[in-house]
Amino acid sequence: MDRARIARLLPEIYQSALAPNKPLAATLEVMEMLQAPAENALATLDAHIDPMRAPPNFVLMLARWLDLDRYLDWTGGRPGEGAPRYAAGLGRLRLLCLEAAELARWRGTRRTLERILTVATGVSGYAVEENPPGPKGVARCFHLRVVAPAAARPLADLVRRIVDEERPAYTTYDIEFSQA
């Protein structure tokens, strides 16, 4: 807010006392300078909320707001120690933040588990089998077999954390990586 707008908010008696090089004019100048950073932030707020345009550190904050911080690694080895990072890269985290609302809407479904794995890792070809046969050929109730593409093997820890968090709570699971 510029000085002239601030001055219009003052009572008339103060407005009549407003003159250049006087204490009230200096006070209004300071008020204008103090408000400038907040006004600049508000003017570009959409650039911060949009995960595709947000600064890298703000993408990490968006991930926390969207409850995706459980997929972050920490340089110190434990959550909260060191700097957070995302194993599949910042670009993948941006896409995951972008789709977080839709993924949360259908959380716990086979289709969503396959989709979040694809978006989070950047590798396609995941398959989730529900109630697959066990060693004796009998269906394993409340069990999932996640078949991950071989290209996702370097992100095995991330894949495991995603399956562990996004699967229905009452199910057990196995993760297998395809050979080719």
Image (cartoon, rainbow, N blue to C red):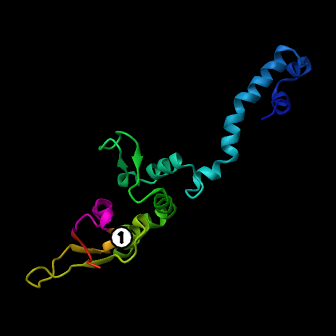
Q: Which residues are magenta?
A: 153-173
Q: Nearer the viewer, residue 149 or 128?
A: 149
Residue in the picture at 66% in, 42% down:
41
Q: Nearer the viewer, residue 57 or 27?
A: 57
Quadrant for the N terminus, please. Answer: top right
- Furthest-front residue in view? 180
Q: Which class describes the residues within 10 Å of circle 1: few (<14), some (14-19), or many (20+)?
A: many
Residue in the picture at 86% in, 14% down:
22
Residue in the picture at 53% in, 47% down:
58
- Furthest-bottom residue in view? 137
In the image, residue 125 above or below residue 12 = below
In the image, residue 135 above or below residue 161 = below
In the image, residue 136 above or below residue 105 = below
* Residue 28 covered by magenta stretch: no
Q: Which residue is mark 1?
A: 113
**Circle 1 sits in a helix, a strand or a loop, which is it?**
helix
Picture quadrant where residue 118 is located? bottom left
| Magenta part, dominant SS | helix
Task: Give percent across and percent down for residue 70.
Answer: 35, 52
Task: Give percent across and percent down for residue 133.
Answer: 16, 82
Q: Nearer the viewer, residue 121 or 135?
A: 121
Residue in the picture at 75% in, 23% down:
30
Quadrant for the C terminus, please. Answer: bottom left
Q: Is residue 105 left or right of residue 55?
A: left
Q: Is residue 152 left or right of residue 60?
A: left
* Residue 172 covered by magenta stretch: yes
Task: Give percent across and percent down for residue 174.
Answer: 21, 70
In the image, what residue type sits under mark 1? Leu
